[in-house]
């Protein structure tokens, strides 16, 4: 478990984070923009270092080479912060397990997480609030190349993002999705489920069959 003492420059990072929130809210900003708003008047390179740590801590997103945006807001609930952290953890888990599988001798990177529905297997594709159609399509296409015996994919997300998943699914089910992304086939919607033991820990699942 991480403690305050084990997190590099955490006091400076929190001060910088709060200055970014107070000065820019949910608007993008750069290290140069932010440097003038931090009380201890750090250099732009010092602010850049702190922002890099804040990205790693999951509090801020880097949106391009120079600009950042607040990811977790101080006025959000602890539940919402846990969702942000869970999304980052899921992303890291997917990246680590993908590379770990690829490096194992005698494997071809074909391990994917499957869910079974009506005696058919579906490849799991996790959807986060920052995902768009193209990123989900890329993840789905990669997963499908690893196991071509499945019936389709199952989009999985926190219950609060069910509407976001539905919108992405609508795009994945259009015939021209193969022209706009690397997917070779489109999908059609099937069953949906909500699973979990409490309202704060629900997962929405939407099954899409390949056409």
Image (spheres, rainbow, N blue to C red):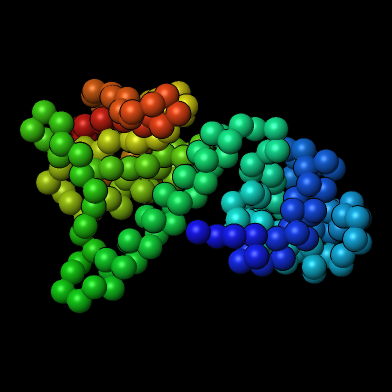
Image quadrant where residue 174 sits: top left
Q: Is residue 171 above or below residue 30?
A: above
Residue at coordinates 52% horizontally, 40% vertically from top-left? Answer: 82
Q: Nearer the viewer, residue 6 or 75?
A: 6
Can residue 194 be seen by looking at this rendering?
A: yes
Q: Is residue 120 above or below residue 49?
A: above
* Residue ranking furthest to the left: 119
Instruction: Report the number of numbered marks.
Output: 0
Image quadrant for the C terminus? top left
Residue 79 in the figure: left or right of residue 17: left
Residue at coordinates 49% horizontally, 50% vertically from top-left? Answer: 88
Q: Nearer the viewer, residue 153 or 10?
A: 10
Residue 147 in the figure: left or right of residue 156: left
Residue at coordinates 90% horizontally, 61% vertically from top-left? Answer: 40
Residue 205 in the figure: left or right of residue 200: left
> Where's residue 28, x and y in %?
74, 45
Residue at coordinates 31% horizontally, 68% vertically from top-left? Answer: 100
> Where's residue 172, x and y in %?
35, 33
Image quadrant where residue 198 sits: top left
Q: Nearer the viewer, residue 104 or 108?
A: 104
> Where's residue 67, x and y in %?
72, 53
> Where's residue 175, x and y in %?
32, 30
Can residue 180 be seen by looking at this rendering?
A: no
* Residue ranking furthest to the bottom: 105
């Amino acid at each position: 478990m991480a403690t305050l003492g084990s997190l590099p420059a955490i006091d400076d990072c929190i001060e910088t984070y709060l200055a970014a929130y107070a000065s820019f809210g949910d608007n993008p900003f750069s290290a140069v923009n932010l440097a003038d708003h931090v009380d201890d008047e750090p250099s732009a390179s010092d602010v850049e270092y702190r922002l890099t740590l804040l990205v790693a801590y999951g509090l801020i997103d880097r949106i391009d080479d120079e600009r950042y945006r607040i990811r977790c807001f101080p006025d959000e609930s602890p539940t919402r912060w846990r969702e942000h952290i869970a999304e980052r953890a899921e992303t890291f888990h997917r990246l680590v397990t993908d590379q770990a599988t690829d490096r194992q001798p005698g494997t071809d990177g074909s391990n994917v997480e499957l869910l079974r529905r009506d005696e058919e297997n579906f490849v799991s594709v996790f959807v986060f609030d920052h995902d768009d159609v193209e990123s989900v399509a890329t993840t789905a296409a990669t997963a499908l190349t690893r196991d071509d015996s499945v019936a389709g994919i199952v989009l999985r997300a926190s219950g609060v993002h069910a509407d976001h998943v539905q919108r992405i699914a609508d795009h994945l089910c259009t015939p021209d999705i193969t022209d706009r992304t690397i997917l070779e086939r489109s999908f059609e919607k099937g069953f949906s489920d909500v699973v979990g033991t409490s309202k704060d820990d629900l997962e929405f699942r939407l099954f899409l069959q390949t056409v």
